[in-house]
Amino acid sequence: MPDVDWTRLKAHELRALAASNAVVILPIASIEQHGPHLPVMTDTRLGHEIALRAARKSVAGGRPTVVAPVVWSGLSEHHMPYGGTLTLSHATFRAVIADLIDALTRHGFRDILISNSHGGNQIAMQQICDELAPKSPATLVATTYVSEAGESLSRHCEDQPGVMHAGEAETSMMMVCEPDLVDTSELDTLTQAMDGARFLKAGTASYRWRPFQHVTANGVVGNPTRASARKGEAMLEAGAEALAKLILDPETWAPVDDIRGPGTKGIPFQ
Ligand SMILES: [Zn+2]
């Protein structure tokens, strides 16, 4: 199995990957507070782990794939009140991603998967794709592993409905990736149930930005009490399987259809 980590490869090996039409996974994440029991690297570490596992599965499935370094600097303004959090402005975040995609395409890579592991990046990630894709020589696809894996990942949670923040899921996965950095001494005191309707919503279907302090006393959302490495391993594999399936599906990278007719009212389309 060839190495799939961009940073461990030599330049000529990366030129060869571009020539073989490899998919590049560009992970985007955050450095932000994850309660008193998980390190601030959590989204960055998990996003990288899942991307590496996904890339190995894609290679095994017949598609060359390489994982670019994680963009750890994300949009985490809503976690600033708890300390330990680093955040970019939207303009800087957009510029960083645009420049990295430009560099990748200049090297000849044409299929790029932006793989997000932090909820706060989601809206901006889609906006950036909307802006860049029409002019980019590459096909840009963006996903968040939690959403892409859906039920196949969340079904491993016993005490919360999905991944949430520093709860059962992320704590379980970090028990696999960085067991020495998970403080299990007070897990049973940390649970915070979040009323989702109170966070980023107003009215029946309206959006309102709010900081995380609106919904959690300690920075945790979810229940880390029942976390286990066994569950974490299953969740990491579910996330990686979902990304690999996305990469290996030819429709993901297929050219855009053009089903326009010759024109209307006798005037051809441009
Ligand atoms: Zn997280």
Image: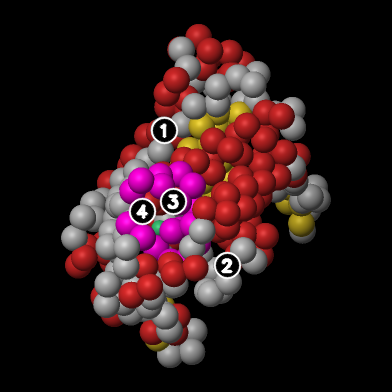
Name the residue rendered at 54%, 35% in the picture: 52
CA–CA distance between discs 1 and 3?
Answer: 19 Å
* Residue 156 image offset from top left, x and y in percent: 62, 63
Label 1 Cα crowd, 10 Å radius (few <14 / some 14-19 / many 20+): some
Tell me the quadrant of ligand 1: bottom left
Q: Are marks 1 and 4 in contact (CB under 8 Å)?
A: no
Label 4 Cα crowd, 10 Å radius (few <14 / some 14-19 / many 20+): some
Q: Nearer the viewer, mark 1 or mark 3?
A: 3
Query: Dot 3 corresponds to which residue?
Result: 174
Q: Amino acid at mark 3?
A: Met
Q: Quadrant of the N terminus?
A: top right
Q: Are marks 2 and 3 in contact (CB under 8 Å)?
A: no
Q: Secondary structure at mark 3?
A: helix
Is residue 97 shown to the viewer in this render? no
Q: Nearer the viewer, residue 268 or 221?
A: 221
Magenta residues, start to end = 166-184
Q: Secondary structure at mark 4?
A: loop
Q: Quadrant of residue 108?
A: top right
Query: Dot 1 corresponds to which residue?
Result: 69
Numbered badge on residue 182: 4
From this view, report whether residue 249 is shown above or below residue 76.
above
Q: Is residue 246 magenta?
A: no
How has the structure been colored for display? secondary structure
